[in-house]
Amino acid sequence: MCHPNTNTSKRLRVINIGIQMFYDALLMQDAKVTQIEWQPPIKQSEEVKELIDKFL
Amino acid sequence: MDIRKRILHANQKAVDRIIHSNPVWVDVLPAVECVEGLTDHMVLHSGPPIEFKDMCYLHKRGMVSGALFEGWAKDEKEAVAMLEAGEIKVDSALNHNTVGAGTGIITKSITMNVIEDKATMVRVATFPAEGPCEGGLCGWGLYNPRIADNLRYMREELFPTIQELIRKRGGLAIKPILAESMQCGDENHTRQTVADLLYDKQILPDLIEMDIPKETILKVMHYILDTPRFFHCYGQGASYAALLGAVGTDYSTMVISACGNGIEFGIQVAGLPGQWFTAPAPMMKGRYTSSKFTEKDQLPWIGDSCVVGCAGMGGFAAAASPIVCNLRGMTAQEAVAQTREMEHISIAKNPNFSIPALDFDFLPVGIDIRLVLKSGILPIIHGGMFNHEGGLIGAGMARVPMKCFEKAMKSFAIKYR
Protein backbone atom coordinates (compact mmCIF):
# COMPACT_ATOMS: atom_id res chain seq x y z
CA MET A 1 0.00 0.00 0.00
CA CYS A 2 1.26 3.46 -0.89
CA HIS A 3 1.95 5.68 2.10
CA PRO A 4 -0.09 8.88 1.63
CA ASN A 5 2.86 11.09 2.49
CA THR A 6 5.54 9.20 0.56
CA ASN A 7 5.07 10.67 -2.88
CA THR A 8 4.17 14.22 -2.03
CA SER A 9 6.40 17.05 -1.05
CA LYS A 10 3.75 18.37 1.32
CA ARG A 11 1.76 16.61 4.06
CA LEU A 12 -1.64 15.44 2.89
CA ARG A 13 -4.58 17.32 4.36
CA VAL A 14 -7.81 15.35 4.02
CA ILE A 15 -11.45 15.92 4.78
CA ASN A 16 -13.08 12.52 5.11
CA ILE A 17 -16.84 12.44 4.75
CA GLY A 18 -18.66 9.44 6.14
CA ILE A 19 -16.91 6.10 6.55
CA GLN A 20 -14.97 6.15 9.81
CA MET A 21 -12.45 3.47 8.85
CA PHE A 22 -10.99 5.69 6.09
CA TYR A 23 -10.43 8.40 8.69
CA ASP A 24 -8.77 5.93 11.07
CA ALA A 25 -6.52 4.53 8.33
CA LEU A 26 -5.33 7.98 7.26
CA LEU A 27 -4.77 9.06 10.83
CA MET A 28 -2.55 6.06 11.46
CA GLN A 29 -0.44 7.10 8.48
CA ASP A 30 0.13 10.54 9.95
CA ALA A 31 -2.08 12.37 7.47
CA LYS A 32 -3.88 15.43 8.75
CA VAL A 33 -7.56 14.45 8.61
CA THR A 34 -10.81 16.08 9.52
CA GLN A 35 -13.73 13.75 9.92
CA ILE A 36 -17.23 14.82 8.96
CA GLU A 37 -20.01 12.48 10.01
CA TRP A 38 -22.35 11.84 7.14
CA GLN A 39 -24.55 9.08 5.87
CA PRO A 40 -26.68 8.82 2.75
CA PRO A 41 -30.16 10.28 3.21
CA ILE A 42 -32.69 7.72 4.42
CA LYS A 43 -35.18 6.53 1.84
CA GLN A 44 -38.65 7.03 3.25
CA SER A 45 -42.03 7.30 1.59
CA GLU A 46 -43.46 10.81 1.26
CA GLU A 47 -46.14 9.84 3.78
CA VAL A 48 -43.60 8.83 6.43
CA LYS A 49 -41.45 11.92 5.70
CA GLU A 50 -44.48 14.13 6.31
CA LEU A 51 -45.24 12.35 9.56
CA ILE A 52 -41.66 12.74 10.78
CA ASP A 53 -41.81 16.47 9.96
CA LYS A 54 -45.10 16.77 11.79
CA PHE A 55 -44.16 14.86 14.94
CA LEU A 56 -40.40 15.47 15.32
CA MET B 1 -50.07 22.57 23.33
CA ASP B 2 -47.99 21.89 20.23
CA ILE B 3 -48.00 18.18 19.34
CA ARG B 4 -44.19 17.98 19.41
CA LYS B 5 -44.14 19.39 22.92
CA ARG B 6 -46.79 16.91 24.02
CA ILE B 7 -44.68 14.07 22.63
CA LEU B 8 -41.55 15.36 24.38
CA HIS B 9 -43.35 15.52 27.74
CA ALA B 10 -44.93 12.11 27.20
CA ASN B 11 -41.64 10.48 26.25
CA GLN B 12 -39.90 11.95 29.28
CA LYS B 13 -42.65 10.54 31.46
CA ALA B 14 -42.44 7.14 29.75
CA VAL B 15 -38.64 6.89 29.92
CA ASP B 16 -38.73 7.98 33.58
CA ARG B 17 -40.71 4.81 34.26
CA ILE B 18 -37.64 2.86 33.20
CA ILE B 19 -35.05 5.11 34.80
CA HIS B 20 -36.83 5.34 38.15
CA SER B 21 -38.02 1.73 38.24
CA ASN B 22 -37.19 -0.31 41.32
CA PRO B 23 -37.62 -3.96 40.37
CA VAL B 24 -37.60 -6.46 43.22
CA TRP B 25 -37.92 -10.26 43.00
CA VAL B 26 -40.72 -10.81 45.49
CA ASP B 27 -42.18 -14.27 45.04
CA VAL B 28 -42.36 -17.62 43.26
CA LEU B 29 -45.81 -18.73 42.10
CA PRO B 30 -47.49 -21.00 39.56
CA ALA B 31 -48.20 -19.09 36.36
CA VAL B 32 -51.97 -19.22 36.83
CA GLU B 33 -51.61 -17.23 40.06
CA CYS B 34 -49.37 -14.47 38.73
CA VAL B 35 -49.89 -14.13 34.96
CA GLU B 36 -52.94 -11.96 34.41
CA GLY B 37 -55.43 -13.40 31.93
CA LEU B 38 -53.78 -16.82 31.78
CA THR B 39 -56.54 -19.38 32.06
CA ASP B 40 -56.87 -23.14 31.95
CA HIS B 41 -56.44 -24.56 28.43
CA MET B 42 -54.30 -21.62 27.32
CA VAL B 43 -50.71 -21.60 26.08
CA LEU B 44 -48.67 -18.43 25.78
CA HIS B 45 -45.84 -18.02 23.27
CA SER B 46 -43.12 -15.55 22.39
CA GLY B 47 -43.42 -12.88 19.72
CA PRO B 48 -46.39 -11.02 18.32
CA PRO B 49 -49.74 -12.88 18.29
CA ILE B 50 -50.03 -15.63 15.70
CA GLU B 51 -52.59 -18.37 15.03
CA PHE B 52 -51.62 -21.98 15.64
CA LYS B 53 -51.86 -22.87 11.94
CA ASP B 54 -49.38 -20.12 10.99
CA MET B 55 -46.78 -20.85 13.66
CA CYS B 56 -43.25 -22.06 12.99
CA TYR B 57 -42.44 -25.65 13.88
CA LEU B 58 -40.85 -24.67 17.21
CA HIS B 59 -43.97 -22.91 18.40
CA LYS B 60 -46.32 -25.63 17.15
CA ARG B 61 -44.24 -28.18 19.00
CA GLY B 62 -44.24 -25.94 22.07
CA MET B 63 -48.05 -25.70 22.00
CA VAL B 64 -48.31 -29.48 21.86
CA SER B 65 -45.69 -29.82 24.61
CA GLY B 66 -47.65 -27.45 26.85
CA ALA B 67 -50.85 -29.40 26.30
CA LEU B 68 -49.13 -32.69 27.13
CA PHE B 69 -47.46 -31.26 30.24
CA GLU B 70 -50.79 -30.01 31.57
CA GLY B 71 -52.50 -33.31 30.73
CA TRP B 72 -55.05 -31.66 28.45
CA ALA B 73 -54.31 -34.19 25.72
CA LYS B 74 -53.14 -37.81 25.90
CA ASP B 75 -50.91 -37.58 22.83
CA GLU B 76 -49.64 -35.25 20.10
CA LYS B 77 -52.51 -36.04 17.72
CA GLU B 78 -55.14 -35.11 20.28
CA ALA B 79 -53.24 -31.96 21.27
CA VAL B 80 -53.03 -30.79 17.65
CA ALA B 81 -56.75 -31.46 17.16
CA MET B 82 -57.59 -29.42 20.26
CA LEU B 83 -55.34 -26.57 19.15
CA GLU B 84 -56.80 -26.55 15.64
CA ALA B 85 -60.33 -26.58 17.04
CA GLY B 86 -59.55 -23.67 19.35
CA GLU B 87 -60.19 -25.78 22.45
CA ILE B 88 -56.76 -24.72 23.62
CA LYS B 89 -56.30 -20.98 23.29
CA VAL B 90 -53.01 -19.41 22.30
CA ASP B 91 -51.78 -15.89 22.89
CA SER B 92 -48.66 -13.76 22.93
CA ALA B 93 -46.93 -13.76 26.32
CA LEU B 94 -46.32 -10.02 26.01
CA ASN B 95 -50.07 -9.43 25.85
CA HIS B 96 -49.92 -10.47 29.51
CA ASN B 97 -47.59 -9.46 32.34
CA THR B 98 -44.96 -11.97 31.35
CA VAL B 99 -42.06 -12.43 28.94
CA GLY B 100 -41.57 -15.41 26.63
CA ALA B 101 -37.84 -16.00 26.25
CA GLY B 102 -37.03 -18.32 23.34
CA THR B 103 -40.24 -20.09 22.41
CA GLY B 104 -41.85 -18.65 25.56
CA ILE B 105 -44.18 -21.55 26.26
CA ILE B 106 -46.18 -20.76 29.41
CA THR B 107 -49.10 -22.73 30.81
CA LYS B 108 -50.92 -22.53 34.12
CA SER B 109 -48.67 -24.90 36.12
CA ILE B 110 -45.28 -23.49 35.14
CA THR B 111 -43.32 -22.11 38.09
CA MET B 112 -42.63 -18.41 37.70
CA ASN B 113 -40.47 -15.80 39.40
CA VAL B 114 -42.46 -12.68 40.25
CA ILE B 115 -40.75 -9.30 39.84
CA GLU B 116 -42.48 -6.22 41.22
CA ASP B 117 -41.54 -2.70 40.26
CA LYS B 118 -41.83 -0.98 43.64
CA ALA B 119 -42.08 2.41 41.90
CA THR B 120 -45.35 1.51 40.15
CA MET B 121 -46.31 -1.81 41.80
CA VAL B 122 -46.48 -3.40 38.33
CA ARG B 123 -45.80 -7.14 38.57
CA VAL B 124 -44.26 -9.30 35.88
CA ALA B 125 -43.66 -13.06 36.03
CA THR B 126 -40.88 -14.85 34.16
CA PHE B 127 -40.04 -18.54 33.97
CA PRO B 128 -36.69 -19.75 35.29
CA ALA B 129 -34.25 -21.73 33.17
CA GLU B 130 -34.84 -25.45 33.48
CA GLY B 131 -31.50 -26.42 35.03
CA PRO B 132 -30.07 -29.58 33.43
CA CYS B 133 -32.76 -29.41 30.71
CA GLU B 134 -31.56 -25.88 29.76
CA GLY B 135 -34.29 -24.30 27.58
CA GLY B 136 -36.58 -27.30 28.11
CA LEU B 137 -40.30 -26.74 27.65
CA CYS B 138 -40.60 -23.01 28.23
CA GLY B 139 -37.53 -21.79 26.35
CA TRP B 140 -37.23 -24.36 23.60
CA GLY B 141 -40.73 -25.86 23.39
CA LEU B 142 -39.41 -29.38 24.00
CA TYR B 143 -41.18 -32.14 25.88
CA ASN B 144 -40.05 -35.58 26.91
CA PRO B 145 -40.17 -37.63 30.12
CA ARG B 146 -36.93 -36.07 31.41
CA ILE B 147 -38.22 -32.52 30.89
CA ALA B 148 -41.58 -33.41 32.44
CA ASP B 149 -39.90 -34.92 35.51
CA ASN B 150 -37.62 -31.91 35.86
CA LEU B 151 -40.54 -29.45 35.64
CA ARG B 152 -42.41 -31.39 38.32
CA TYR B 153 -39.28 -31.49 40.44
CA MET B 154 -38.89 -27.74 40.05
CA ARG B 155 -42.52 -27.17 40.95
CA GLU B 156 -42.82 -29.60 43.84
CA GLU B 157 -39.38 -29.66 45.46
CA LEU B 158 -37.05 -26.97 44.24
CA PHE B 159 -39.17 -23.85 44.10
CA PRO B 160 -41.11 -24.31 47.34
CA THR B 161 -37.69 -23.90 49.02
CA ILE B 162 -36.82 -20.90 46.87
CA GLN B 163 -40.27 -19.44 47.54
CA GLU B 164 -39.74 -19.74 51.29
CA LEU B 165 -36.30 -18.19 50.94
CA ILE B 166 -37.40 -15.15 48.98
CA ARG B 167 -40.46 -14.54 51.15
CA LYS B 168 -38.42 -14.75 54.34
CA ARG B 169 -35.78 -12.52 52.82
CA GLY B 170 -38.37 -9.90 51.87
CA GLY B 171 -37.29 -9.79 48.23
CA LEU B 172 -34.16 -9.21 46.20
CA ALA B 173 -33.46 -5.85 44.51
CA ILE B 174 -32.64 -6.48 40.85
CA LYS B 175 -31.41 -3.07 39.70
CA PRO B 176 -28.18 -2.99 41.76
CA ILE B 177 -27.24 -6.36 40.25
CA LEU B 178 -27.94 -5.12 36.73
CA ALA B 179 -25.96 -1.93 37.34
CA GLU B 180 -22.91 -3.56 38.88
CA SER B 181 -22.78 -6.42 36.41
CA MET B 182 -22.77 -3.99 33.48
CA GLN B 183 -19.71 -2.32 34.99
CA CYS B 184 -18.03 -5.71 34.94
CA GLY B 185 -18.65 -7.02 31.43
CA ASP B 186 -22.30 -8.11 31.20
CA GLU B 187 -24.81 -6.51 28.84
CA ASN B 188 -27.53 -8.59 30.48
CA HIS B 189 -28.93 -10.17 27.39
CA THR B 190 -26.36 -12.58 25.99
CA ARG B 191 -24.10 -12.41 29.05
CA GLN B 192 -25.02 -12.66 32.75
CA THR B 193 -21.72 -14.04 34.05
CA VAL B 194 -21.26 -11.34 36.68
CA ALA B 195 -24.96 -10.93 37.41
CA ASP B 196 -25.13 -14.65 38.22
CA LEU B 197 -22.28 -14.28 40.72
CA LEU B 198 -23.80 -11.20 42.34
CA TYR B 199 -27.10 -13.05 42.64
CA ASP B 200 -25.38 -16.08 44.17
CA LYS B 201 -23.55 -13.85 46.66
CA GLN B 202 -26.84 -12.56 48.02
CA ILE B 203 -29.03 -15.64 47.81
CA LEU B 204 -26.75 -18.52 48.81
CA PRO B 205 -25.98 -17.37 52.39
CA ASP B 206 -29.73 -17.15 53.04
CA LEU B 207 -30.21 -20.59 51.55
CA ILE B 208 -27.51 -22.11 53.75
CA GLU B 209 -29.08 -20.59 56.86
CA MET B 210 -32.49 -22.18 56.14
CA ASP B 211 -33.72 -24.72 58.63
CA ILE B 212 -34.15 -27.51 56.10
CA PRO B 213 -32.26 -30.77 55.34
CA LYS B 214 -28.73 -30.32 54.04
CA GLU B 215 -29.61 -32.48 51.06
CA THR B 216 -32.31 -30.02 49.99
CA ILE B 217 -29.94 -27.08 50.39
CA LEU B 218 -27.36 -28.79 48.21
CA LYS B 219 -29.93 -29.64 45.53
CA VAL B 220 -31.15 -26.05 45.32
CA MET B 221 -27.60 -24.71 45.36
CA HIS B 222 -26.50 -26.98 42.54
CA TYR B 223 -29.56 -26.05 40.51
CA ILE B 224 -28.72 -22.36 40.85
CA LEU B 225 -24.98 -22.72 40.29
CA ASP B 226 -25.18 -25.25 37.46
CA THR B 227 -27.71 -23.30 35.40
CA PRO B 228 -25.93 -20.95 33.00
CA ARG B 229 -27.39 -17.44 32.76
CA PHE B 230 -29.61 -18.12 35.76
CA PHE B 231 -30.16 -14.38 36.25
CA HIS B 232 -31.48 -13.80 32.71
CA CYS B 233 -35.13 -14.26 33.69
CA TYR B 234 -34.81 -11.65 36.45
CA GLY B 235 -33.37 -9.08 34.05
CA GLN B 236 -36.21 -9.69 31.62
CA GLY B 237 -38.82 -9.41 34.37
CA ALA B 238 -37.29 -6.19 35.67
CA SER B 239 -37.22 -4.73 32.16
CA TYR B 240 -40.78 -5.59 31.26
CA ALA B 241 -42.15 -4.45 34.62
CA ALA B 242 -40.56 -1.04 34.01
CA LEU B 243 -41.79 -0.93 30.41
CA LEU B 244 -45.34 -1.94 31.35
CA GLY B 245 -45.34 1.04 33.70
CA ALA B 246 -45.11 3.24 30.62
CA VAL B 247 -47.94 1.58 28.69
CA GLY B 248 -50.80 3.97 28.01
CA THR B 249 -48.72 7.14 28.28
CA ASP B 250 -50.68 9.24 25.81
CA TYR B 251 -48.59 10.82 23.04
CA SER B 252 -45.53 8.73 23.87
CA THR B 253 -43.61 7.32 20.90
CA MET B 254 -41.40 5.09 23.08
CA VAL B 255 -41.13 1.39 22.22
CA ILE B 256 -42.23 -0.83 25.10
CA SER B 257 -41.64 -4.24 23.56
CA ALA B 258 -39.82 -5.91 20.69
CA CYS B 259 -40.07 -9.60 19.92
CA GLY B 260 -40.23 -12.30 17.29
CA ASN B 261 -42.15 -15.51 16.71
CA GLY B 262 -39.88 -17.03 14.06
CA ILE B 263 -42.16 -15.69 11.32
CA GLU B 264 -42.86 -12.08 12.23
CA PHE B 265 -41.18 -9.48 14.40
CA GLY B 266 -43.32 -7.02 16.34
CA ILE B 267 -43.03 -3.89 18.41
CA GLN B 268 -45.45 -2.08 20.71
CA VAL B 269 -45.49 1.62 21.56
CA ALA B 270 -46.33 3.27 24.89
CA GLY B 271 -48.87 5.69 23.42
CA LEU B 272 -50.62 3.01 21.36
CA PRO B 273 -51.54 0.33 23.91
CA GLY B 274 -52.78 -3.01 22.61
CA GLN B 275 -51.49 -2.51 19.06
CA TRP B 276 -48.78 -4.57 17.37
CA PHE B 277 -46.63 -3.36 14.48
CA THR B 278 -45.11 -6.25 12.61
CA ALA B 279 -42.77 -7.12 9.75
CA PRO B 280 -41.01 -10.31 8.65
CA ALA B 281 -38.68 -11.49 11.43
CA PRO B 282 -35.00 -10.70 10.75
CA MET B 283 -32.17 -13.21 10.61
CA MET B 284 -29.36 -12.87 13.12
CA LYS B 285 -25.72 -12.27 12.40
CA GLY B 286 -23.22 -13.74 14.79
CA ARG B 287 -21.25 -16.78 15.64
CA TYR B 288 -22.47 -20.34 15.48
CA THR B 289 -21.58 -22.91 18.11
CA SER B 290 -20.28 -25.22 15.37
CA SER B 291 -18.84 -24.74 11.89
CA LYS B 292 -21.47 -27.16 10.59
CA PHE B 293 -24.17 -24.50 11.04
CA THR B 294 -24.97 -21.90 8.40
CA GLU B 295 -27.72 -19.31 7.94
CA LYS B 296 -29.86 -22.04 6.34
CA ASP B 297 -30.08 -23.73 9.74
CA GLN B 298 -31.15 -20.56 11.51
CA LEU B 299 -34.73 -19.68 12.37
CA PRO B 300 -35.64 -15.99 11.96
CA TRP B 301 -35.79 -14.12 15.27
CA ILE B 302 -37.78 -15.89 17.96
CA GLY B 303 -38.21 -14.71 21.55
CA ASP B 304 -39.19 -11.80 23.75
CA SER B 305 -35.94 -11.37 25.62
CA CYS B 306 -35.05 -8.22 23.68
CA VAL B 307 -37.35 -6.38 26.10
CA VAL B 308 -34.01 -5.86 27.88
CA GLY B 309 -32.92 -3.81 24.84
CA CYS B 310 -36.09 -1.72 25.10
CA ALA B 311 -35.08 -1.03 28.71
CA GLY B 312 -31.58 0.09 27.64
CA MET B 313 -29.54 -3.08 28.02
CA GLY B 314 -28.54 -5.86 25.60
CA GLY B 315 -27.67 -4.31 22.24
CA PHE B 316 -27.86 -0.83 23.74
CA ALA B 317 -25.30 -1.84 26.36
CA ALA B 318 -22.71 -3.23 23.91
CA ALA B 319 -20.10 -0.86 25.36
CA ALA B 320 -20.56 -2.59 28.71
CA SER B 321 -19.68 -5.95 27.21
CA PRO B 322 -16.92 -5.91 24.59
CA ILE B 323 -16.55 -9.64 25.26
CA VAL B 324 -20.05 -10.36 23.93
CA CYS B 325 -19.38 -8.19 20.89
CA ASN B 326 -16.05 -9.92 20.36
CA LEU B 327 -17.94 -13.20 19.92
CA ARG B 328 -19.17 -11.70 16.67
CA GLY B 329 -15.69 -10.51 15.72
CA MET B 330 -16.12 -6.91 16.89
CA THR B 331 -13.38 -4.86 18.54
CA ALA B 332 -13.84 -3.10 21.88
CA GLN B 333 -13.96 0.19 19.97
CA GLU B 334 -16.78 -1.12 17.79
CA ALA B 335 -18.69 -2.19 20.89
CA VAL B 336 -18.51 1.37 22.17
CA ALA B 337 -19.54 2.65 18.74
CA GLN B 338 -22.61 0.39 18.82
CA THR B 339 -23.84 1.96 22.05
CA ARG B 340 -23.03 5.44 20.71
CA GLU B 341 -25.06 4.64 17.59
CA MET B 342 -28.03 3.61 19.74
CA GLU B 343 -27.86 7.00 21.50
CA HIS B 344 -29.15 8.58 18.28
CA ILE B 345 -32.49 6.76 18.58
CA SER B 346 -32.87 6.94 22.37
CA ILE B 347 -34.92 9.36 24.42
CA ALA B 348 -32.54 9.67 27.37
CA LYS B 349 -29.54 8.31 29.20
CA ASN B 350 -29.96 6.17 32.26
CA PRO B 351 -27.89 7.54 35.18
CA ASN B 352 -28.22 4.18 36.94
CA PHE B 353 -26.01 2.53 34.35
CA SER B 354 -22.62 4.24 34.19
CA ILE B 355 -20.15 2.34 31.98
CA PRO B 356 -16.35 2.34 32.31
CA ALA B 357 -15.72 1.97 28.56
CA LEU B 358 -17.85 5.08 27.97
CA ASP B 359 -15.64 7.00 30.39
CA PHE B 360 -18.47 6.45 32.87
CA ASP B 361 -21.06 8.00 30.61
CA PHE B 362 -24.56 6.51 30.94
CA LEU B 363 -26.26 3.98 28.69
CA PRO B 364 -28.93 5.21 26.27
CA VAL B 365 -32.50 4.21 27.05
CA GLY B 366 -35.98 4.43 25.53
CA ILE B 367 -36.31 3.78 21.78
CA ASP B 368 -38.19 6.60 20.04
CA ILE B 369 -39.91 5.48 16.82
CA ARG B 370 -39.57 9.02 15.41
CA LEU B 371 -35.80 9.04 15.86
CA VAL B 372 -35.50 5.62 14.21
CA LEU B 373 -37.44 6.84 11.18
CA LYS B 374 -35.60 10.15 10.99
CA SER B 375 -32.10 8.69 11.35
CA GLY B 376 -32.62 5.37 9.61
CA ILE B 377 -30.73 3.77 12.51
CA LEU B 378 -32.44 0.52 13.43
CA PRO B 379 -32.23 -0.74 17.03
CA ILE B 380 -29.67 -3.50 17.52
CA ILE B 381 -30.90 -6.45 19.54
CA HIS B 382 -28.72 -9.18 20.96
CA GLY B 383 -29.84 -12.75 21.37
CA GLY B 384 -29.47 -16.45 20.83
CA MET B 385 -29.82 -18.17 17.47
CA PHE B 386 -32.21 -21.09 17.25
CA ASN B 387 -32.33 -23.69 14.55
CA HIS B 388 -35.55 -24.89 12.97
CA GLU B 389 -35.81 -27.93 15.23
CA GLY B 390 -35.00 -26.14 18.49
CA GLY B 391 -31.92 -25.61 20.59
CA LEU B 392 -29.37 -22.86 20.48
CA ILE B 393 -26.89 -22.87 17.61
CA GLY B 394 -25.18 -19.57 18.30
CA ALA B 395 -25.47 -16.01 19.53
CA GLY B 396 -25.46 -12.71 17.75
CA MET B 397 -27.46 -9.65 16.84
CA ALA B 398 -30.15 -8.40 14.50
CA ARG B 399 -31.75 -5.07 13.71
CA VAL B 400 -35.44 -4.44 14.26
CA PRO B 401 -37.12 -4.10 10.83
CA MET B 402 -37.90 -0.54 9.65
CA LYS B 403 -41.41 -1.61 8.60
CA CYS B 404 -42.40 -1.97 12.28
CA PHE B 405 -41.60 1.70 12.91
CA GLU B 406 -43.32 2.92 9.74
CA LYS B 407 -46.52 1.12 10.69
CA ALA B 408 -46.31 2.44 14.25
CA MET B 409 -45.84 6.03 13.07
CA LYS B 410 -48.85 5.78 10.77
CA SER B 411 -51.04 4.44 13.58
CA PHE B 412 -49.74 7.16 15.88
CA ALA B 413 -50.81 9.76 13.30
CA ILE B 414 -54.30 8.30 13.18
CA LYS B 415 -54.70 8.34 16.97
CA TYR B 416 -53.06 11.70 17.60
CA ARG B 417 -53.98 13.59 14.43
Image (spheres, rainbow, N blue to C red):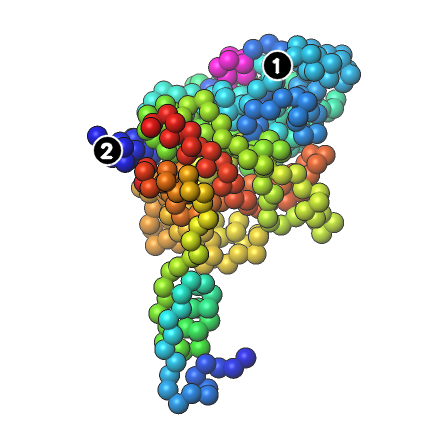
Q: Which kind of residue does numbered mark 1 sit on?
A: Lys
Q: Which kind of residue does numbered mark 2 sit on?
A: Asp
Q: Residue at x 56, y 29 (%)?
A: B47
Q: Residue B367, labelled with which disc? A: none
State which mark lies toward you, 1 or 2.
2
Q: Residue at x 74, y 14 (%)?
A: B81
Q: Badge 2 local density, few (<14 within 10 Å), some, or many (20+)?
A: few
Q: Quarter of the image holding residue B115?
A: top left
Q: Which residues are magenta?
A: B28-38
Q: Residue at x 50, y 58 (%)?
A: B331
Q: What residue does disc 1 label?
A: B89
Q: Residue furthest bottom?
A: A9
Quarter of the image with the C terminus of chain B in it: top left
Find numbered disc 2 in the image and state the secondary structure of the residue it sits on.
loop
Cα distance in 3D space between marks 1 and 2? 44 Å
Q: Can you give x and y, in whole percent of width and height, for residue B29 in the image?
A: 52, 16
Quarter of the image with the N terminus of chain B in it: top left
Q: What residue does disc 2 label?
A: B2
